[in-house]
Amino acid sequence: MVTSKLDTMRESKPFDLSKLAMVVGLLLVAFQIYTAGFGPFPPLVQRSGHTGLALIMVYLTLDKLGGPFSDFLSTRTGAMVRLVLAVVVGGTCFYIVTQDTRLVESFAVFATPFEIACALVLMILVAFVAYSSTGVALPLLAVATLLYTLFGNHIAGRWGHSGFDLQYTVEYLYLGTEGIWGQVTGLSAGLIAIFIIFGAVLLSTGAAQSFMDIALLVAGRRPGGAAKVATASSAFMGMLNGSAVANVATTGNFSIPAMKRLGYRPRFAAAVEATASSGGQITPPIMGAGAFIMAELLGVPYTMIAYAAIIPAVLFFACVWFSIDIEARREGMKPFPVEEMPHWKEVFALRRFLPLALTLVVTLGAMFTGRTPSLAAFYGIVTNVTLFLLLGEYSWSSFKSRFCSLLEGVNSAASGIVSILALLVCAQITLSLIGLTGVGVKLTETIMMINENNFQLLAVVFAMIVALVLGMGMPTTAAYLLSAAVAAPALIRLGIDPISAHFFVFYSALLSALTPPVCTAVFTAAVIAREHWWPICIDAMRLATMKYLLPFFFIYREGVLLKGTWYEIASSAVMGLVAAMLLAIATGRFYRQPVHWYVSAILALAGVSVVANHVVTDLIALLALATVVVRQWLAVSSGAAGQAVAERR
């Protein structure tokens, strides 16, 4: 009996691997900061080293990731299993580091049985982490493409291929820079990781909180102030962390309860948070790493993508802002109480405001003067950390507190890198095999067949649906990469400019965060708000109406991407704002007074017609907006005048 109790106690007290995981996390962050500031290692070394450190940390902390075996992994035996798996997965990656010279200098490389085993083990362990993190969708897609690669020669017709054996597939995936260590993993090892660290540093030093306080000062006392502040804060945070779901889970935990406390309907509060968080990934300059990935795929300077993204982001948030304003006037929403507003002297105090302002100036200045984005992020991190340590009380306790905050930020950064690494590697495997088997080309040809009868719009809509479906349940980067591999080439072959095509695919893929049935950002917000997800989904789609229309702007009104003459750019921006306001009034069915359903339908059609980029449709949209605004202002004014006369009597 005593022996049984001792065994139970030993089993219930697992090895504490958290400190070892923290050390690995510190090494990972140090590796990324060093290579960002002083230049990366050779591609295979940089990518396999980054992946190895991240996956070691993943398996050391696998019990905290959830998944089907989390209870077992929390036990003593489970901790030993985690440690063994961490050593194994690290070994499969660092083996590539030791073989760099051989793999680069050899004309032809043939996989040994040991290397085949390493590749298979690595792919299985990566797929398991991806499954534990986000569910079955992405690893299932990777497994399906692998099976198609190995057995697709048995498929008859145009969807079959000549066939690839296991050895060749492993050589392609594991022993070169076309497979697991390809472009996507390279982006993770370079740009994405350093900007995750940049965002975590801004959070840990309080710079992000300073931005939120500024948003509160600007919009807090306006109608719908709480929702507008939540929109600005979530957009900023979503731009940094690159995940709508993660952003809802963090900022939503205080923004949704705050809005509910001020009288907002729970479903609307959750919808605002989900919509704003999904907008963070389209907000320049970082765009949740989307801008860097797009620049890499297109082979253009990052600054070109960041500039092009400005007007679309403004139009999206204008539509959200208009919708919130309409909802606030219709429902009588309260602004933030005066006593909860920060004082402007406190917000703009030197020790609080200077780290945020100077960090952004240095980072953006470096980007727009030709430095690489990773080097700009390095400069920003150094600037922010230096100012954070210098601007404060000069006492041991104060310095210790700030140093501990930085350590928490480093740990958070490592966790952020780890959380997305397995997903990116899974996406890289899928993309590599899509390229190897030619299935991407076949999907492109399918879209081209729709266009054979000059039905370009139908082909474009089909491409949007493909991107939307591929993006379901996926994180931002994986959703865009998968969609870009399939849909973007088809759009380019239709004669659409490559930048327009990639922006179309990027926006379309990100719609999955709000669109049923797999609207992950909505699901997360629903849990926090304690409401059913369907009404929240309806409100979120209503708030984000412009996001569904903007992909078509990129093709038919390219001026929103700062392309064309100044007149084309200005007219596209102005008409985009007109469309945003028309859609906000139509979906909210209110401006200063309620709007009849048939008027809403007319306004919605007028807003959508702006995409046509024709003088007639533009005039119709302007006339529709002017009519409803003037009529409602006059009705409200006459009503107020009549009430004043009645009161005087």
Image (cartoon, rainbow, N blue to C red):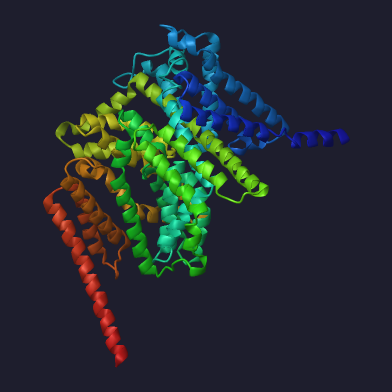
Given residues 206 and 527, the one toward you in this image is 206
Q: In which quarter of the image is the C terminus?
A: bottom left
Q: In which quarter of the image is the N terminus?
A: top right
> Please, which residue is most extreme toward the front here?
394
Given residues 484 and 211, the one toward you in this image is 211
Q: Residue at x 38, y 48 (%)?
A: 279
Quadrant housing residue 293 = top left
x then y, percent, for residue 149:
40, 19
x then y, percent, for residue 272:
42, 56
Q: Which residue is drawn at 42% across and 66% down?
A: 221
Q: Residue at x 41, y 54 (%)?
A: 232
State left or right for residue 94 relative to residue 541.
right
> Please, which residue is most extreme toward the right here?
2
Residue 502 at least partly seen: yes
Quadrant housing residue 441 = top left
> Please, which residue is most extreme toward the left here?
616
x then y, percent, for residue 397:
67, 48
State left or right for residue 120 relative to residue 335.
right
Residue 268 at least partly seen: no
State left or right for residue 467 relative to residue 6.
left
Given residues 35 and 152, the one toward you in this image is 35
x then y, percent, for residue 320:
35, 55
Number of labelled discs?
0
Q: Residue at x 51, y 48 (%)?
A: 249
The answer to whether residue 373 is above or below residue 388 is above
Quadrant housing residue 231 = bottom left
